[in-house]
Image (cartoon, rainbow, N blue to C red):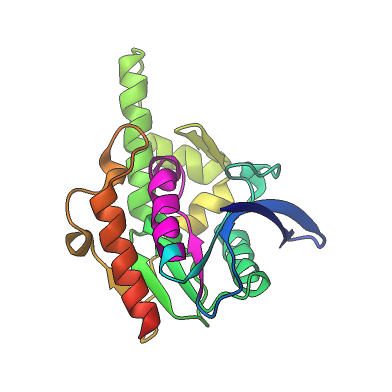
Amino acid sequence: MTPLSWPCPLPGGGTSEEYALAFDRGRTNRLLVVPALFDEANRLRRQSVEVMRRLDGAGVDCFLPDLPGCNESLQPLEVQSPEDWRDAVAFAAMHFGATHVLGIRGGCLLTPEKLPCRHYAPINGASILRQMIRARILAAREAGTVETQQDLMDQAMAEGIELTGYRLSAEFIDQFQSLAPREGPNVQEIGQDMVGGAGLWLRAEPDENRQQADALAAILAIGLAA
């Protein structure tokens, strides 16, 4: 596994150097992995890398890029939009010469249209926002403060909001809440029932599961070979 940098396009022109984890041996099948978003990205990153390790052993090159404003990125999150992230993913696919794309959870909202995609346990934008708002309400309750979902959404749409440590603009919220994973003949969904067990995004801390990593990597490797 090698850490690489790639030139991510900026909305106003120019580029920013973002990191990506890569298993790159110049092979025919090259898989871009679009990570889960926000807290789920932290919970699933170790598992995502374990799946990539197995695919590397199966002869598939893999690339896991940082989105601008996330992970090691130096770009501010509050100026990003879902469209910026989609553009970044499309450019990363081109930059790394991807032949296929794997979207994980919220990453399925960002997969490019022109490549064959696998969507692992996809979720829509509105559901992600509801989960983040519930987490903020629970945290506020523990601190002795009362917040409601409607009040928080009104604030988010008017001036942006901070949810689970992520500062999101009103523009981001407006676009994100209407996003759904795309469908089409070149999109295949991989449900959690195909992998087995409960999804690791449900756990409180980052974790990994060998059996689930084996199963997901096998599904992907067989599909790519076909």
Q: Is residue 171 above or below residue 147?
A: below
Residue 96, given in percent of the width and then of the height, sits at 64, 70
Q: Quadrant of the C terminus?
A: bottom left
Residue 196, given in percent of the width and then of the height, sits at 17, 56
Along the line of sight, the residue nearer the viewer: 126 or 66: 66
* Side of 50 where 159 appears, left or right: right
- Report the residue that reaches farthest toward the right: 14
Q: Is residue 139 above or below residue 174?
A: above
What's the residue at 17%, 51% (across, down)? 197
Residue 75, given in percent of the width and then of the height, sits at 70, 45
Visible residue check, residue 72:
yes
What's the residue at 44%, 58% (across, down)? 52
Q: Is residue 5 magenta?
A: no
Question: In which quarter of the view is residue 84 placed?
Answer: bottom right
- Report the residue that reaches farthest toward the front: 57
What's the residue at 35%, 26% (across, down)? 147
Along the line of sight, the residue nearer the viewer: 213 or 103: 213
Question: In which quarter of the view is residue 130 placed?
Answer: top left
Q: Which residues are magenta?
A: 30-56
Q: Is residue 53 magenta?
A: yes
Residue 172, given in percent of the width and then of the height, sits at 55, 52
* Side of 207 where 109 appears, left or right: right
Visible residue check, residue 146:
no
Q: Is residue 225 above or below residue 44?
A: below
